[in-house]
């Protein structure tokens, strides 16, 4: 794989870990097992049946926890550590090796997943405020679908996955800006003096 496609695969696999780390890891594990993507030898343990079963359990827990009010915020708090770590592993497993300087891959993966996690964690309270928490499960479903789509495209069409990821980032950031403006315009409750 040429360096540009390899870097695109790294970003396409690692950034979605900021939304759902276990789904990204599971899809890359399955993709490597079925030959859709090549992973570095040091990460071949990801293709083991044990790793895949554990990831299926973790994906299930993540998907459910992210749909339940209050638990979703706690899940995001835990994700502050887990999501960048998963991104680092994913980029190092499938991305460009930078002439053996694996630490560059770890940093790029952690930063890309951490950035998406930061956007997710900062938008979730806005969704909660503006919709009373009713939109949180819907937004979470779209995050899961977006993460899965980008990771699958990272294996099959790396450059397309990078373009889709950039488009998703643009949409999410635009929505975030719109929500922030909406929250700022809300009239604050007036306190009446007795």
Image (tube, rainbow, N blue to C red):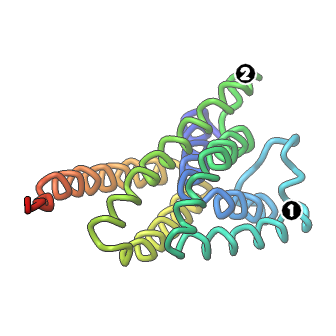
Q: Which residue: 58% across, 52% down?
A: 77
Q: Is residue 91 left or right of residue 188?
A: right
Q: Residue furthest front?
A: 194
User: Looking at the image, is 13 positioned above or below residue 23?
Assistant: above
Q: Nearer the viewer, residue 88 or 42?
A: 88
Helix, strand, or loop for circle 2? helix
Q: Are marks 1 and 2 in contact (CB under 8 Å)?
A: no
**Residue 71: quarter of image:** bottom right
Place of residue 132 in the rendered image (x, y in percent of width and height, measured from the top left):
33, 73
Q: Which residue: 60% across, 60% down?
A: 75
Foreground tag (1 vs 2): 1
- Name the disc covering residue 142, or none: none
Dot placed on the residue nearer the N-terminal end, 1 or 2: 1
Query: Dot 2: few (<14), some (14–19), or many (≥20) neighbours within 10 Å?
Result: few
Q: CA distance from mark 1 to mark 2?
A: 28 Å
Mark 1, residue position = 51
User: Looking at the image, is 32 positioned above or below residue 86?
Assistant: below
Mark 2, residue position = 99
Q: Is residue 97 left or right of residue 108?
A: right
Q: Is residue 41 left or right of residue 111?
A: right
């Amino acid at each position: 794989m040429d360096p540009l496609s390899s870097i695109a695969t790294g970003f396409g696999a690692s950034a979605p870990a900021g939304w759902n780390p276990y789904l990204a890891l599971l899809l890359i594990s399955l993709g490597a097992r079925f030959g859709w993507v090549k992973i570095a030898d040091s990460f071949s343990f990801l293709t083991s049946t044990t790793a895949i079963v554990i990831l299926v359990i973790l994906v299930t827990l993540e998907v459910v926890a992210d749909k339940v009010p209050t638990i979703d915020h706690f899940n995001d708090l835990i994700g502050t550590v887990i999501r960048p770590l998963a991104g680092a592993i994913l980029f190092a497993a499938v991305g460009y090796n930078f002439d053996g300087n694996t630490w560059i891959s770890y940093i790029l993966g952690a930063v890309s997943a951490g950035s998406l996690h930061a956007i997710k964690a900062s938008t979730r309270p806005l969704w909660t405020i503006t919709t009373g928490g009713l939109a949180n499960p819907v937004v979470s479903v779209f995050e899961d679908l977006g993460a899965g789509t980008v990771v699958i495209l990272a294996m099959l069409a790396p450059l397309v996955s990078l373009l889709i990821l950039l488009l998703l980032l643009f949409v999410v950031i635009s929505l975030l800006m719109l929500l922030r403006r909406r929250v700022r315009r809300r009239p604050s409750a007036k306190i009446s003096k007795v």
